[in-house]
Image (spheres, grey):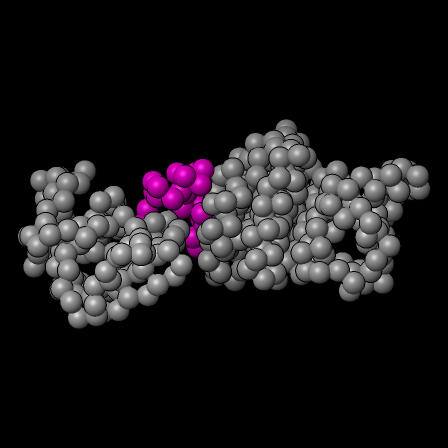
Amino acid sequence: MDLHLKAIAKRYANVAALDAVDLDVASGELVALLGPSGSGKTTLLRVIAGLLPPDSGRLLFGQNDATRLSLRERNVGFVFQHYALFKHMTVAENIAFGLRSRPRARRPDKATIAKRVQELLGLIQLPELGARYPEQLSGGQKQRVALARALAIDPTVLLLDEPFGALDAKVRVELRRWLRRLHDQTGQTTLFVTHDQEEALELADRVVVLKDGRIEQIGTPDEIYSAPASAYVFDFIGRANVIDGQTEGGELSIDGHGLRLPVDVHSRSRARLYVRPHDMALVGAGEGLAARVISSHRLAERITLELNVEGQTRPLELDLVATPDAVTPAAGSLIHVRPLRYRVYSD
């Protein structure tokens, strides 16, 4: 089922939680809603679910206007961060709950429900755990059961609100890769909310970056990471160095340094250069920015240098590959660095 949001708005007192949001989600697509706290991502998910009414705008499932339909009428599957499983019910009973709660005229018979539950237990790779209770499961298993319960009703769309937020780091990685495989099997139209950039970039077909109730950028993970549409997106996605400078005649200059970098801006204006720590290189004197090493930190195969560049208010980071014979510049030493791949945004 494809999904269309047309100028959806929602306010709380004087704050615009959603400000005329337009979004089209194709049938079978897996879309991440990404942003910091207060960006509007959970509000948007709840409006789609029918848990919150929009102040204005329209919501369509396919060609059908669902704006004023109730949660039950929309038939969405919703998975919460903290599972929300019924403790007094077995795993099988939890999965069957949505089907058993349907009005009698639409409720499948017991044999059909039992068959559907067994299919879903197999799909979530827990075929032998139907008789257990939630407290007998691990966090990752509980979240799989919550997903199965949401899928049991054959939802129009599947909505996930920070589905891995309550899990430890290793389980999060394992479960999100499992979810991607599950999605590829089922082809279910899915939207999930996260503030974890890595999670969004690994899982989603497309990422929607939100800021202050508005969509800042929509794109594939590669587009969002490699071609951010604004300084906000560049700074929010991944790690970013910010260097103040000035553009003129297709070049960016940095006060106090002889470095000139080609840019697509020809007017004279103050600007900021954004560059990833791994997109800078050590160069010889006179070929880059002079930088003083503040400290160094090693994480597995990566060494990160924290640098002070004269005239800059923020320290920079430079990532180096930690080879066995690599010599790490000592704290206090002077080095020279040059941005290789970067983007420039005018102030």
* Viewer-nearest residue: 230 or 226: 226
Question: Which residue shows up at 57% across the image and 32% down it?
Answer: 26
Please, which residue is most extreme toward the top here? 63
- The magenta segment is 208-231
* Viewer-nearest residue: 332 or 259: 332
- Residue 346 % position (x, y): 21, 48
Q: Quadrant of residue 226?
A: top left
Question: Which residue shows up at 67% across the image and 51% down it?
Answer: 79
Q: Quadrant of residue 190?
A: top right
- Residue 276 % position (x, y): 30, 51
Question: Which residue shows up at 57% across the image and 39% down it?
Answer: 30
Residue 43 in sight: no
Question: Which residue shows up at 21% across the image and 63% down it?
Answer: 329
The answer to if 107 sits in the magenta stretch is: no
Q: Quadrant of residue 29?
A: top right
- Residue 301 % position (x, y): 37, 56
Q: Is residue 97 left or right of residue 125?
A: right
Please, which residue is most extreme toward the front here? 325
- Residue 59 % position (x, y): 60, 39
The answer to if 220 sits in the magenta stretch is: yes
Q: Is residue 118 left or right of residue 331?
A: right
